[in-house]
Protein backbone atom coordinates (compact mmCIF):
# COMPACT_ATOMS: atom_id res chain seq x y z
CA UNK A 1 0.00 0.00 0.00
CA UNK A 2 1.09 3.59 -0.60
CA UNK A 3 2.15 5.62 2.42
CA UNK A 4 0.05 8.53 3.63
CA UNK A 5 2.73 10.96 2.40
CA UNK A 6 2.34 9.63 -1.18
CA UNK A 7 -1.31 10.70 -1.29
CA UNK A 8 -2.13 13.91 -3.18
CA UNK A 9 -5.73 13.37 -4.25
CA UNK A 10 -9.05 11.69 -3.52
CA UNK A 11 -11.41 10.14 -6.06
CA UNK A 12 -14.92 9.91 -4.67
CA UNK A 13 -17.90 7.77 -5.40
CA UNK A 14 -21.11 9.74 -4.78
CA UNK A 15 -24.11 7.54 -4.01
CA UNK A 16 -23.71 6.00 -0.55
CA UNK A 17 -20.49 7.88 0.24
CA UNK A 18 -21.32 11.59 0.05
CA UNK A 19 -25.06 11.17 0.47
CA UNK A 20 -27.42 8.32 1.12
CA UNK A 21 -28.84 8.16 -2.39
CA UNK A 22 -27.80 4.49 -2.33
CA UNK A 23 -30.98 3.96 -0.29
CA UNK A 24 -33.00 5.91 -2.89
CA UNK A 25 -31.58 3.82 -5.76
CA UNK A 26 -32.41 0.67 -3.77
CA UNK A 27 -35.96 1.85 -3.09
CA UNK A 28 -36.56 2.73 -6.76
CA UNK A 29 -35.14 -0.60 -8.03
CA UNK A 30 -37.15 -2.52 -5.45
CA UNK A 31 -40.31 -1.01 -7.02
CA UNK A 32 -39.19 -2.20 -10.46
CA UNK A 33 -38.38 -5.71 -9.13
CA UNK A 34 -41.86 -5.92 -7.60
CA UNK A 35 -43.41 -4.77 -10.87
CA UNK A 36 -41.64 -7.43 -12.97
CA UNK A 37 -42.13 -10.14 -10.33
CA UNK A 38 -38.51 -10.62 -9.22
CA UNK A 39 -38.06 -11.43 -5.55
CA UNK A 40 -36.03 -8.80 -3.70
CA UNK A 41 -33.47 -9.42 -0.98
CA UNK A 42 -30.65 -7.41 0.61
CA UNK A 43 -28.02 -9.34 -1.32
CA UNK A 44 -29.58 -8.20 -4.61
CA UNK A 45 -29.69 -4.64 -3.24
CA UNK A 46 -25.95 -4.81 -2.43
CA UNK A 47 -25.07 -6.32 -5.81
CA UNK A 48 -26.73 -3.35 -7.59
CA UNK A 49 -24.61 -0.74 -5.79
CA UNK A 50 -22.19 1.06 -8.08
CA UNK A 51 -23.59 -0.59 -11.21
CA UNK A 52 -24.92 1.46 -14.14
CA UNK A 53 -28.64 1.87 -14.74
CA UNK A 54 -29.03 -0.70 -17.55
CA UNK A 55 -26.60 -3.16 -15.94
CA UNK A 56 -28.69 -2.92 -12.77
CA UNK A 57 -31.90 -3.72 -14.63
CA UNK A 58 -30.23 -6.64 -16.41
CA UNK A 59 -28.97 -8.01 -13.08
CA UNK A 60 -32.48 -7.83 -11.57
CA UNK A 61 -33.95 -9.64 -14.59
CA UNK A 62 -31.19 -12.29 -14.47
CA UNK A 63 -31.86 -12.93 -10.78
CA UNK A 64 -35.47 -13.69 -11.67
CA UNK A 65 -34.54 -15.73 -14.79
CA UNK A 66 -36.36 -13.08 -16.83
CA UNK A 67 -33.46 -11.86 -18.95
CA UNK A 68 -35.35 -12.70 -22.15
CA UNK A 69 -38.80 -11.68 -20.96
CA UNK A 70 -38.65 -8.06 -22.17
CA UNK A 71 -37.81 -6.32 -25.45
CA UNK A 72 -35.08 -3.65 -25.50
CA UNK A 73 -37.79 -0.97 -25.68
CA UNK A 74 -39.57 -2.43 -22.66
CA UNK A 75 -36.28 -2.50 -20.77
CA UNK A 76 -35.62 1.13 -21.62
CA UNK A 77 -39.05 2.08 -20.32
CA UNK A 78 -38.50 0.11 -17.08
CA UNK A 79 -35.16 1.89 -16.58
CA UNK A 80 -36.80 5.25 -17.35
CA UNK A 81 -39.56 4.54 -14.83
CA UNK A 82 -36.95 3.65 -12.19
CA UNK A 83 -35.14 6.90 -12.90
CA UNK A 84 -38.35 8.91 -12.60
CA UNK A 85 -39.04 7.28 -9.20
CA UNK A 86 -35.47 8.04 -8.19
CA UNK A 87 -35.66 11.67 -9.34
CA UNK A 88 -38.79 12.22 -7.25
CA UNK A 89 -36.62 11.39 -4.22
CA UNK A 90 -33.59 13.38 -5.45
CA UNK A 91 -35.71 16.46 -6.05
CA UNK A 92 -36.54 16.56 -2.34
CA UNK A 93 -32.86 16.55 -1.35
CA UNK A 94 -31.16 19.43 0.44
CA UNK A 95 -27.73 19.90 2.10
CA UNK A 96 -29.27 18.08 5.11
CA UNK A 97 -28.90 14.88 3.05
CA UNK A 98 -25.09 15.05 3.10
CA UNK A 99 -23.88 12.09 5.15
CA UNK A 100 -22.43 12.96 8.60
CA UNK A 101 -18.82 14.17 8.56
CA UNK A 102 -18.57 14.47 4.77
CA UNK A 103 -18.80 18.29 4.55
CA UNK A 104 -16.10 18.60 7.22
CA UNK A 105 -13.92 16.08 5.39
CA UNK A 106 -14.25 17.89 2.04
CA UNK A 107 -13.38 21.22 3.66
CA UNK A 108 -10.36 19.64 5.41
CA UNK A 109 -9.15 18.17 2.10
CA UNK A 110 -9.47 21.53 0.39
CA UNK A 111 -7.77 23.39 3.26
CA UNK A 112 -4.85 20.97 3.21
CA UNK A 113 -4.38 21.22 -0.55
CA UNK A 114 -5.58 17.78 -1.61
CA UNK A 115 -7.20 17.50 -5.01
CA UNK A 116 -10.51 15.76 -5.52
CA UNK A 117 -12.56 14.34 -8.34
CA UNK A 118 -15.80 12.41 -8.74
CA UNK A 119 -16.04 8.85 -10.08
CA UNK A 120 -19.77 8.16 -10.00
CA UNK A 121 -21.59 5.86 -12.42
CA UNK A 122 -24.66 8.06 -12.06
CA UNK A 123 -25.88 10.33 -14.84
CA UNK A 124 -27.75 12.22 -12.12
CA UNK A 125 -24.65 13.19 -10.16
CA UNK A 126 -24.55 16.88 -11.26
CA UNK A 127 -28.14 17.30 -10.01
CA UNK A 128 -27.45 15.45 -6.74
CA UNK A 129 -24.34 17.58 -6.06
CA UNK A 130 -26.28 20.76 -6.85
CA UNK A 131 -29.10 19.84 -4.44
CA UNK A 132 -26.52 19.06 -1.76
CA UNK A 133 -24.71 22.37 -2.36
CA UNK A 134 -21.43 20.51 -3.04
CA UNK A 135 -20.86 21.23 -6.75
CA UNK A 136 -17.93 23.55 -5.96
CA UNK A 137 -15.85 20.66 -4.60
CA UNK A 138 -16.27 18.54 -7.73
CA UNK A 139 -15.41 20.70 -10.70
CA UNK A 140 -13.50 17.62 -11.88
CA UNK A 141 -15.89 14.74 -12.49
CA UNK A 142 -15.71 11.74 -14.80
CA UNK A 143 -18.58 11.76 -17.30
CA UNK A 144 -20.02 8.23 -17.01
CA UNK A 145 -21.50 8.43 -20.53
CA UNK A 146 -17.94 8.41 -21.95
CA UNK A 147 -16.90 5.14 -20.27
CA UNK A 148 -16.43 1.84 -22.07
CA UNK A 149 -16.80 -0.26 -18.91
CA UNK A 150 -18.62 0.15 -15.62
CA UNK A 151 -17.39 -0.72 -12.12
CA UNK A 152 -15.75 -3.15 -11.18
CA UNK A 153 -13.65 -2.21 -14.24
CA UNK A 154 -10.96 0.31 -13.15
CA UNK A 155 -11.63 2.75 -16.01
CA UNK A 156 -13.67 5.28 -14.00
CA UNK A 157 -11.13 5.48 -11.15
CA UNK A 158 -8.19 5.74 -13.58
CA UNK A 159 -9.99 8.62 -15.28
CA UNK A 160 -10.64 10.20 -11.88
CA UNK A 161 -6.87 10.25 -11.22
CA UNK A 162 -6.14 11.52 -14.74
CA UNK A 163 -8.46 14.49 -14.18
CA UNK A 164 -6.23 15.41 -11.23
CA UNK A 165 -3.05 14.86 -13.28
CA UNK A 166 -1.97 12.33 -10.63
CA UNK A 167 -0.69 8.78 -10.82
CA UNK A 168 -3.24 6.31 -9.35
CA UNK A 169 -0.69 5.46 -6.63
CA UNK A 170 -1.04 9.06 -5.40
CA UNK A 171 -4.81 8.72 -5.02
CA UNK A 172 -7.24 7.32 -2.52
CA UNK A 173 -10.59 6.09 -3.88
CA UNK A 174 -13.61 6.18 -1.57
CA UNK A 175 -16.50 3.76 -2.15
CA UNK A 176 -19.49 2.09 -0.48
CA UNK A 177 -19.92 -0.70 -3.06
CA UNK A 178 -17.97 -3.94 -3.47
CA UNK A 179 -17.87 -3.36 -7.24
CA UNK A 180 -16.41 0.11 -6.60
CA UNK A 181 -13.73 -1.12 -4.19
CA UNK A 182 -12.72 -3.72 -6.80
CA UNK A 183 -12.49 -0.91 -9.39
CA UNK A 184 -10.28 1.23 -7.11
CA UNK A 185 -7.96 -1.70 -6.36
CA UNK A 186 -7.68 -2.61 -10.03
CA UNK A 187 -6.89 1.04 -10.85
CA UNK A 188 -3.90 0.91 -8.47
CA UNK A 189 -5.29 3.40 -5.97
CA UNK A 190 -5.61 2.93 -2.22
CA UNK A 191 -9.18 1.90 -1.45
CA UNK A 192 -11.35 3.07 1.40
CA UNK A 193 -14.59 1.14 1.81
CA UNK A 194 -17.36 2.83 3.77
CA UNK A 195 -19.83 0.39 5.30
CA UNK A 196 -20.04 -3.31 6.11
CA UNK A 197 -16.47 -4.73 6.47
CA UNK A 198 -17.64 -8.15 5.25
CA UNK A 199 -19.19 -6.83 2.04
CA UNK A 200 -16.15 -4.57 1.51
CA UNK A 201 -13.52 -7.11 2.60
CA UNK A 202 -11.16 -6.25 -0.27
CA UNK A 203 -10.84 -2.58 0.73
CA UNK A 204 -7.36 -1.50 1.94
CA UNK A 205 -9.05 0.52 4.68
CA UNK A 206 -12.57 0.12 6.05
CA UNK A 207 -14.64 2.64 7.95
CA UNK A 208 -18.05 1.49 9.08
CA UNK A 209 -19.51 5.00 8.83
CA UNK A 210 -18.75 8.33 7.20
CA UNK A 211 -17.98 10.13 10.48
CA UNK A 212 -14.80 8.00 10.67
CA UNK A 213 -13.57 9.36 7.34
CA UNK A 214 -10.96 11.85 8.60
CA UNK A 215 -7.38 12.56 7.53
CA UNK A 216 -6.15 11.49 10.99
CA UNK A 217 -7.90 8.12 10.75
CA UNK A 218 -6.63 7.56 7.21
CA UNK A 219 -3.07 8.42 8.27
CA UNK A 220 -3.28 6.00 11.21
CA UNK A 221 -4.65 3.22 8.99
CA UNK A 222 -1.99 3.71 6.29
CA UNK A 223 0.97 4.04 8.64
CA UNK A 224 -0.03 1.04 10.73
C1 LIG B 1 -24.28 4.53 -8.99
C2 LIG B 1 -25.24 3.87 -8.02
O1 LIG B 1 -23.62 5.57 -8.34
O2 LIG B 1 -24.98 5.05 -10.11
C3 LIG B 1 -26.09 2.83 -8.72
O3 LIG B 1 -24.49 3.25 -6.99
C4 LIG B 1 -26.80 3.47 -9.92
O4 LIG B 1 -27.04 2.33 -7.81
C5 LIG B 1 -25.73 4.09 -10.84
O5 LIG B 1 -27.53 2.50 -10.65
C6 LIG B 1 -26.34 4.77 -12.07
O6 LIG B 1 -27.10 5.85 -11.63
P1 LIG B 1 -28.14 6.68 -12.49
O7 LIG B 1 -28.50 7.80 -11.56
O8 LIG B 1 -27.43 7.15 -13.72
O9 LIG B 1 -29.27 5.77 -12.82
MG1 LIG C 1 -21.87 4.12 -4.21
Image (spheres, rainbow, N blue to C red):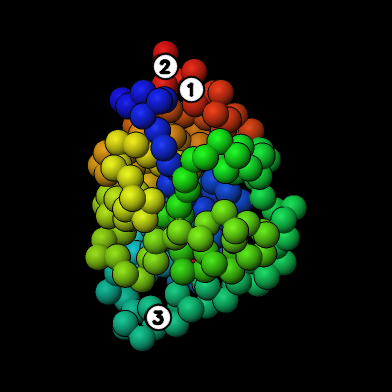
Q: Which residue is mark 1?
A: 219
Q: Position of residue 223 (x, y in %)?
A: 42, 16
The crowding category of the residue bearing disc 1, from other C-alpha atoms within 10 Å (few below 14, some 14 to 19, many at least 20), is some
- The circle drawn on residue 223 is 2
Of the two numbered discs 3 and 2 in the rendering, the one whose residue sits closer to the viewer: 2
Write down the residue under mark 3: 76
Question: Residue 93, located in which quarter of the rendered image?
Answer: bottom right
Could you tell me which quadrant the C terminus lies in?
Answer: top left
Left or right: 169 with respect to 53? left
Q: Residue at x 60, y 39 (%)?
A: 111
Instruction: For the residues labelled 2 and 1, say whether their Cβ atoms are less than 8 Å apart.
Output: yes
Q: Secondary structure at mark 1?
A: helix
Query: Where's residue 2, x and y in %?
Result: 32, 27
Locate the N terminus by quadrant. Answer: top left
Q: CA distance from mark 2 to mark 1?
A: 6 Å
Instruction: Tell me which numbered mark, 3 or 1, is placed earlier along the sequence.
Output: 3
Picture residue at 47% right of the left edge, 29% below the top:
206
Amino acid sequence: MATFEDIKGFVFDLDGVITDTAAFHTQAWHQVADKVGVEWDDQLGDALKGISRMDSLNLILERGNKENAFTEDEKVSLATEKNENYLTLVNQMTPANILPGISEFLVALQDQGYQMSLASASKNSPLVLKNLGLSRFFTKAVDPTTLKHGKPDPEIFRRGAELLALDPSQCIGVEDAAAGVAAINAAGETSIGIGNPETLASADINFTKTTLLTLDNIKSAMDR
